[in-house]
Image (cartoon, rainbow, N blue to C red):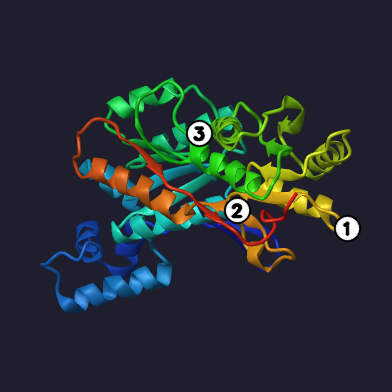
């Protein structure tokens, strides 16, 4: 801890220890330990002196160290996400935290920023802190680095995307079925030139949604054209450029499926002020989508349900479940609000 001295310069302040508490209270370290751990055998007046010393010094127990000495839980789980700033992953985090709070554990969270190296660093850092279990939204496809931890008894659950080269519990959403449903829905309003804007095909969800787009085209009886597909890391400028080409081609797209909430938002910004808009249907719901003009139609899935299902699997393993790894696929639903119901 750092504080300011009388002359305004910063100085390091050491954390109070049990020795400090014992010295101030005039008791043994064993007595302090008994009071801190609420054990019997301490005279009430002595306990009061110890508690007063604890308050005065701001002493806090090192729960992780205590639990490790006892060979028990550290009371923490690690959660590795793509980006904690993404509202979708905020919903996942909240659900994991709520389940963990009920189980008496805290959640340590970090963002991989879609970087496999950063994902590995975070996961191994959490393991070095002896978390009781790991929840990971994988950025890469190589997870052999987790095998020693898994063999040592640390349960790992992957969510939103599967692991690349290890077998573990996994919770996904119906990416293929949802995107196929989006295409069929747009085709029902007469659209035959339907475009798809997706994230990098190296990302599992982006590739699965592209596969669903192909299946939807086949199911709806509309042609799948490579010229109507744009895949890659999308920022506002790249989405604007893609939409410009798609809408101004000799045979333009009249409808667009966007592959995630961020691409949808970029597309809405690019289309703002345009007198004629293509029908638009996005994968992932997002805040205020229902208040825009027109309201945005989406393929919605419950981020909280994803986080809860993953946390439930993790805690089942911590409770002793040794059944084979499970793969859970959560349903999605089409929410028709207006932007996807524009006729060709």
Q: Between 267 and 178, which is closer to the camera in this rendering?
A: 178
* Residue 121 visible in the current orientation: yes
Mark 2 vs 1, N-terminal side: 1
Q: Which residue is mark 1?
A: 275
Q: On the picture, is 73 further left or further right than 320?
A: right
* Residue 111 visible in the current orientation: no
Q: On the picture, is 49 further left or further right than 42?
A: right
Quarter in which the N terminus is drawn: bottom right
Residue 286 location (% of width, % of height):
61, 57
Residue 32 location (% of width, % of height):
25, 62
Residue 33 location (% of width, % of height):
23, 59
* Marks 3, 2: nearer the viewer: 2
- Against 258, residue 297 (above or below) is below
Quarter-of-image position of residue 197 = top right
SS type, badge 1: loop
Q: Which mark is residue 298?
A: 2
* Marks 2, 1: nearer the viewer: 1
Mark 1 vs 3, N-terminal side: 3
* Marks 1, 3: nearer the viewer: 1
Q: Which residue is mark 3?
A: 138
Mark 1 nearby-residue class (10 Å; few <14, some 14–19, many ≥20):
few
């Amino acid at each position: 801890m750092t504080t300011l001295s009388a002359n305004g310069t910063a100085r390091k302040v050491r954390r109070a220890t049990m020795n400090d508490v014992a010295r101030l209270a005039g008791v043994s370290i064993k007595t302090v330990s008994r009071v801190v751990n609420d054990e019997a055998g301490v005279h009430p007046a002595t306990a009061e002196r110890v508690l007063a010393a604890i308050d005065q010094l701001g002493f806090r127990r090192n729960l992780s160290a205590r639990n490790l000495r006892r060979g028990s839980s550290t009371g923490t789980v690690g959660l590795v996400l793509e980006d904690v700033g993404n509202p979708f992953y905020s919903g996942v985090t909240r659900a994991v935290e709520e389940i963990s709070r009920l189980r008496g554990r805290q959640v340590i969270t970090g963002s991989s920023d879609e970087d496999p190296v950063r994902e590995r660093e975070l996961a191994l850092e959490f393991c070095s802190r002896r978390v009781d279990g790991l929840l990971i939204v994988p950025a890469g496809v190589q997870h052999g680095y987790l095998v020693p931890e898994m063999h040592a008894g640390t349960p790992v659950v992957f969510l939103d995307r599967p692991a690349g080269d290890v077998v573990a519990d996994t919770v996904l959403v119906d990416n293929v079925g949802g995107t196929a449903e989006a295409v069929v829905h747009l085709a029902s309003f007469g659209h035959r030139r339907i475009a798809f804007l997706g994230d990098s095909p190296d990302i599992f969800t982006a590739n699965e949604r592209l596969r669903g787009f192909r299946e939807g085209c086949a199911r709806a009886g509309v042609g799948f054209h490579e010229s109507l597909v744009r895949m890659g890391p999308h920022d506002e400028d790249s989405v604007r450029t893609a939409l410009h080409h798609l809408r101004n081609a000799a045979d333009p797209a009249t409808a667009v499926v966007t592959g995630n909430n961020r691409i949808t938002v970029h597309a809405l910004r690019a289309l703002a002020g345009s007198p004629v808009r293509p029908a638009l249907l996005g994968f992932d719901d997002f805040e205020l989508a229902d208040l825009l003009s027109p309201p945005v139609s989406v393929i919605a899935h419950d981020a909280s349900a994803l986080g809860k299902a993953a946390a439930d699997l993790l805690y089942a393993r911590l409770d002793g479940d040794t059944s084979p790894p499970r793969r859970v696929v959560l349903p999605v639903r089409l929410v028709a609000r207006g932007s996807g119901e524009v006729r060709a």
